[in-house]
Image: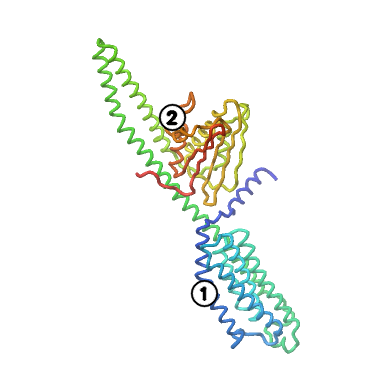
Amino acid sequence: MTPGLVQWLTRVTRLFEIPAPDPARLRQRIIMMERNIMLPVKAVFIGIISYSFDVTPWINLTSGTPDVVVETVQIFFWFYTLASAVLGGLLLGADRLPLALVQWTVFTTSLVDGIFIASMALLAGGRDSILFWLLVALIVRNSVTVPAGGSQLILNFAICACYALAAVLDIAVFQVQDDFSRLMLESPLGEGLGQPFVLRMTVLLLTTFCCSGLELLMERHRLAAEEAGEFAARESQLRSAGRLAAEFAHQIKNPLAIINNAAFSLKRAVREGSPGATEQIHIIQEEVARADQVIIQIMGYAQLSEGRVEKLSVMDELNRALLQVFPPAISAGIKVHCDHGVGFPPLLMQRGHLSEILLNLLQNAREALPQGGDVFVAATCHRDYSVEISVRDSGPGIAPDKIGRVFEAYYTTKEKGTGMGLAIVKHNVELYGGTVRLESELGKGANFTVIFPAKTVKTFSP
């Protein structure tokens, strides 16, 4: 198989990938459909059938149908009633039970419903029964409450198999009738399953595939709309941060310029004066230069906020940062241990922001191990789809009285440190509503953890 064909098949496969359902949205759909709609409908349905069995049979039982078939369906009906009561009780507590248990309940309920409807169809016309359309409705119902994918297809194929089994049993019942009973039946002898059965199976299968495809398209459309909203929110958030930084820089640069000019004039005026005055003037100029560096850094924040938000792969960006900080060709006595999960959602961020976060954390860990050691990098996707990345080193650690200040600008515990690396990490993480924390003990290394939320949390006002 050529690489081009493999690439084409990979792209086609990705088109049919089923996005993971949002747990809260899925639970809400199950409660609406199964508990609020289907439970009352099933209660009425069971009541009608129970009354018809015991008092006035409304089902048009075919003359000559063996009593054993009717009795078997009646016995199964009582088991169905009991199972519906138990499963219905679980659905009543769907908002408090674990989602996995709720999904199992829905799957089992639908399967039991399909078997029972097929058994009732066997009594009410067999493969030509009007109850066939309830199976079609059941498949549509499954597309609402069962996530698209393997479980939904398996369940709907099982519903189709129930109808096929009812049709086969209908033929078997026909074959065991005597001649008089066969004359009373609508289907002629030897017809077999016939064209109507094929057409009805086609309807069931088409409904199965159409519902799955439609749900896939709707889910992708919903995700695209949510992502568009996320892009807009984060772009607005970053523009707000940039405007704040630019406004601050503009407001402070003018007074600093005036101070610098005044200091220059004062220096010229006292050129013939005492050296002490000149020394004070030098101090003023140095402080102005230092404040100007702060403004340059803030302007860097503003420029970084003017970038473009992208969909970034967590693992791709993390691997790229690891190669930059710990290139394989350079042996520094540092061993990097990576531990990451799977199924990470894309991060809607500026590439520069995420790159700065990862590079600074990894570089910080490397600088903490001048004599070599271990660096542990872990990435985890939580159940709420937030992404956690931690970088831990086996270095000397940080004293407890210094932990609270490591994220302050210009504060550093290193001889040649600038004090801006971790400040940039904190700034960039909080731009996206995330958090960063440090856990450290002397002699046991330091562990930096950043968490990016699944949804935007607006932290700046326009």
Which of the numbered marks, if any, corresponds to residue 411?
2
Q: Amino acid at mark 1?
A: Pro
- Pinpoint residue 386: horizontal percent, then vertical percent: 51, 48
Inspect the image, locate mark 2, and give the three-letter code of the amino acid beneath it.
Tyr
For label 1, the residue is 40
Mark 2: give few (<14), some (14-19) or many (20+) Cα within 10 Å.
some
Q: Earlier in the sequence, mark 1 or mark 2?
A: 1
Name the disc covering residue 213, or none.
none
Please, which residue is most extreme toward the left here?
Answer: 269
Q: Residue at x 39, y 35 (%)?
A: 302
Where's the C terminus, which quadrant? Answer: top left
Q: Secondary structure at mark 2?
A: loop
**Where in the figure is residue 219, as x and y percent of width and height?**
52, 57
What colour scheme governs how the chains and residues are painted in the rendered image of this protein? Answer: rainbow
Q: Is the residue 126 above or below the residue 237 in the image?
A: below
**Position of residue 349 measured from the top left corner of the image (x, y, whole percent):** 47, 42
Residue visible at 48% across and 24% down in the picture: 416
Tell how many labels. Answer: 2
Q: Give whichever of 353, 374 is nearer the camera.
A: 374
SS for callout 1: helix
Of the pair 349 and 396, the residue shown nearer to us: 396
**282 relative to 453 in the view: left or right:** left
Q: From the viewer's perspective, is 319 left or right of 174?
A: left
